Amino acid sequence: METYKPEPIDLSDVELTDDLDELREAIAENAHEIWAESRQAEGWTYGPERNDVLKQTPDMVPYSRLPESEKEYDRDMAMKTIKLLKKLGYDIIRREDTELYRVLKQRIKDSAQQYFCRRCHHVIYRHQIFCDNCGLELKMDWNEK
């Protein structure tokens, strides 16, 4: 069998402005959502540790609750995608604040609000399905403190 040698397009000469940070976050979050949807269709669920036999992963959470290391992976892929578009000659222009843009901004703001697990009082967030600390399934009956 032939050894595969990846040869991505060199993007080191492409410079981006800071105004693309929101676009990067939107692409990164959506990429995670696509990944999670695909995993769920394959039978994967949330688990505190990755378990291929049980099809459980701690990454089966909303993007806002991912560890920074996982977010950085998605952000890096998003930035490389944006840089590739620029290198291919495309311009990226946001013409107006769309309804989706406003919803995304509000979702990011809302996901930063902290709540507490009713069993162990560990910090949880609205988008979580299970408490990271005790594993309790969260059913939207939030206990704010």
Image (tube, rainbow, N blue to C red):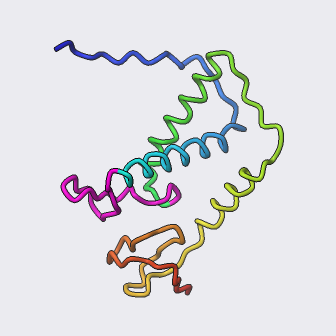
Residue at position x 77%, y 53% in the image? 99
Residue at position x 50%, y 55% in the image? 63
Query: Residue 132: x percent and y percent?
Result: 37, 70
- For the residue pair 86 and 54, the one nearer the viewer reads as 54
Q: Relative to residue 55, is residue 145 depicted above or below?
A: below
Asked if residue 58 is among those painted magenta in the image, a careful observer would answer: yes
| SS assignment for the magenta stretch, majority | loop
Query: Residue 82: x percent and y percent?
Result: 60, 29
The N terminus lies in which quarter of the figure?
A: top left
Query: Residue 8: x percent and y percent?
Result: 44, 18
Q: Relative to residue 16, is residue 121 depicted above or below?
A: below
Give the left or right position of residue 129, taking residue 102 as reference: left
- For the residue pair 20 and 89, the one nearer the viewer reads as 89
Asked if residue 51 is among those painted magenta in the image, a careful observer would answer: yes
- The range drawn in magenta is 42-64
* Numbered-mark total: 0
Query: In which quarter of the view is residue 86 placed?
Result: top right
Residue at position x 20%, y 12% in the image? 2
